[in-house]
Amino acid sequence: MSSSSSSSSSLHEIILTSSPEGPISAYNPSSGATLAHFSGSRSPRQGLAFAGKTFIVASHISPTTASGSIHLYNWWSSTPLHNLPLPEPVAPVISTPDGLYLFTGGVSGSIYVISLPSGDILRSFSAHKKPVTCLESSIDGSLLISGGDDGRIITVPIFQLVDHHTSGDNNPNDLMLQKFIAHNGSVTAIVSCMGSFKSLMVSSSTDCTCKLWRLDGTHLHNLTFPCAIMGVTLDPTETEFYAAGSDGLIYRGSLKFESKKHIIQDNELATLVQKHEGMVVSVAMVNEGKNLVSASEDGSVYIWEVESGEVIFVLGNEMGSISEMLVASGIGESKGCGIEGGKGRNNEKGGGVFEVYGEELLRRSMKESVDLEEVLRVAAKNRSKAIDMLESAIAMYEKLLELILKEAMRGSTITNLKNKDEI
């Protein structure tokens, strides 16, 4: 696939991979070129996320002390801008769409709610009996969904988690909307999707199954595989899925919802022809669903053509191992520039993604990034201040209403006394 033939969506997509042993790497999905490396993080599985258009988020486990922290990068620097310490090692991370809040799951089963970019822990609560293994948000962004090594899935309203004015000591059961046993093994991934009438989710597990659920925990369908499934993705129409097999294969099947029952019709599974040498840790769609990306524990990244089911690029083997892979969208659009015309190359100095497109663009982008960080800080402060002012106003009106009621009752009493005197 040449860069001239790639769609406009490809111009604003970047593949990002993390490693427990080496740097975070960025690739151009259109050409397969390595765009940049981000150093300093040793990330476990699921330990990679985006916080809005501003930050790359990586879970980090110190190789010397085994302590846990979160590293924040922007697109213009190869080293972490912020190191956010945490009480324990954490793995899965996910942020709110505005990038102001981060959720991460610990080895104890606790979930932490973190304010960005300050790193303040707003609350933590015990969600699972074993380590948290994956985090996802519902399709409408209202719920945080987590899976654990205990096979459970829980859902929590996000507004409860990010409310600065509620106690961080809430009973965990009071926070959870749903909590149910989903799998006999570890929950490896959760994907939120939209059915005909209600939001749904697909979960995968080491118990060799993928399952379809309503968000209330109603089980709709089961798909059984010959191996553990480490991740799953849906095509843009949500009628086909691709599952990442621990055996190195990509499994493909169809999702066909009956009109009002939300049931998947049974379909035979197929496998894509080429096989990774190691376990597939993640799969994702790019280029409006025309291409599939798969990343393997062996350090390779395959770019597939969906229509033919063939591999058109093989990337990687630069870091020795891959723990997670994501696709960033809208990167060029967010900064008013595209990747088109920039010649992808390895960044030997380890600079950010757009350093490959010229020093002038880099300087401008760095300034924009710093300005955006300041805007986020101010927005977070203003948001908190606005809430305080609103609560103060509500309290004032409540007191005023109380006084009015007292005066009304006092006036009523006086009138009654006068009427009695007249009688």
Image (cartoon, rainbow, N blue to C red):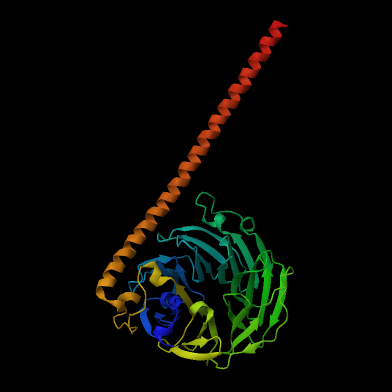
Reply above or below: 293 against 97: below
Front-most of residues 267 and 166: 267
Q: Decide if residue 346 is on the left or right side of residue 418.
A: left
Which residue is at a point 69% across and 10% down the rendered structure image? 419
Quadrant of the snapshot with the C terminus? top right
Residue 370 spot, x, y in % from top left: 32, 63
Reply above or below: 275 against 329: below
Residue 334 spot, x, y in % from top left: 39, 67
Reply above or below: 23 against 152: below
Residue 352 spot, x, y in % from top left: 33, 75
Front-most of residues 234 and 408: 234
Residue 84 spot, x, y in % from top left: 41, 65
Which residue is at a point 54% across and 54% down the rendered structure image? 168
Q: Decide if residue 358 is on the left or right side of residue 74.
A: left
Quadrant of the snapshot with the N terminus? bottom left
Q: Residue furthest left?
A: 360
Q: Decide if residue 18 is on the left or right side of residue 404.
A: left
- Mark count: 0
Q: Residue furthest front?
A: 5
Say whether residue 224 is visible. Answer: yes
Q: Residue furthest top?
A: 422
In which quadrant of the rendered view does residue 228 lie? bottom right
Say whether residue 352 is visible. Answer: no
